Structure formats: C-alpha cells, structure tokens
Amino acid sequence: MNTIRVYRCLCDETRLRILNLLLEGPLCVCHIAAVLDMEQPKVSRHLKALKETGMVVTERCYNWTICRIPETPNTVLQANLKCLQDLRGEEQQFKTDLAKRNRTVRKMVDSDCAALPAQIRKIC
C-alpha cells in the first residue's frame, strides 16, 4: 500500500462521496452513478482509483458490479473512514447523497428485490 496514493485518492470530492455512500453498505455502480447524478463511465474511473488503493472491492454479478468497502480495511483507510463517518453529518452534500441513496434502495425493494440475484439482494 502506498500511503501517498491513498491520500491523493482521498483528495477528490467524488471519491469521498462514493466512500460516504458505501459506508452504508454495498451498491451497484449504476446506483452510485444515479445517486451522484454522473455518467457511469466517470463513476467507474473513480471506482478504479479507489479499487487500486484498496479502498473499494468489487464483485461481478451478471451485468451488475457490486462495490463495497473491504471487510478488513487497511489501517490508513480505516482511520480515514472513521474521520469521514464522524464528519458526514456536517457536510450537506453527504447528507443529500445519503438521502438519495436511501430513496434508490427503497425503489429497488419496492420493485420486488426478491427476484434479483443473491449478491444484488444484499443491497436491499
């Protein structure tokens, strides 16, 4: 792990917003894009940077790519996630993103989440 690369990665607002969303649990790339109101390729580029530094792991499920924070994050990530979690209530953009995330997940549940594959149901 390269600590400098981790901090360079954390200096990006979009990447912090993604981590904020993933603190609540796993999400598909398409849902992250919807919450952030961004094109999916742009979100994928940010996720690639997060993945390269070990801050995000992904799992393919059919056409879906499920993203989550590693179950055992490295010490640098763990310390920064704690800081992010402590400050997320103070940043309006984080609050807005979380509210939109909750609405997006609720829509999935309302659209019969039980019919989805097991890895995707984890989100619901």
Image (cartoon, rainbow, N blue to C red):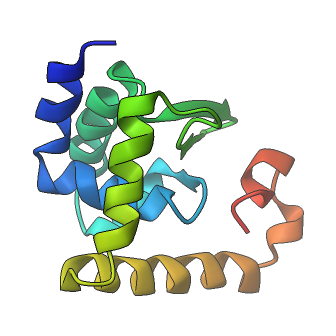
- In the figure, 120 relative to 17: above or below? above
- In the figure, 33 relative to 58: above or below? below
Q: Quadrant of residue 24?
A: bottom right
Which residue is drawn at the image coordinates 21% and 86% (left, top)?
92
Number of numbered callouts drawn:
0
Where is residue 108 drawn, in percent x and y? 67, 75
Q: Quadrant of residue 51?
A: top left
- In the figure, 77 relative to 108: above or below? above
Which residue is drawn at the image coordinates 18% and 21% (left, top)?
5
Image quarter where the C terminus lies is bottom right
Q: Quadrant of residue 82?
A: bottom left
Q: Nearer the viewer, residue 16 or 58?
A: 16
Which residue is drawn at the image coordinates 44% and 30% (left, top)?
75
Where is residue 94 drawn, in percent x and y? 29, 76
Where is residue 4 drawn, in percent x and y? 14, 21
Image quarter where the N terminus lies is top left
Which residue is drawn at the image coordinates 55% and 32% (left, top)?
58
- Left or right for 64, reference 34: right
Q: Is residue 33 visible?
A: no
Q: Is residue 74 visible?
A: yes
- In the figure, 18 relative to 119: above or below? below
- Left or right for 120, reference 44: right
Where is residue 99 drawn, in percent x and y? 43, 87
Query: Looking at the image, which residue sits at the far top?
Result: 1
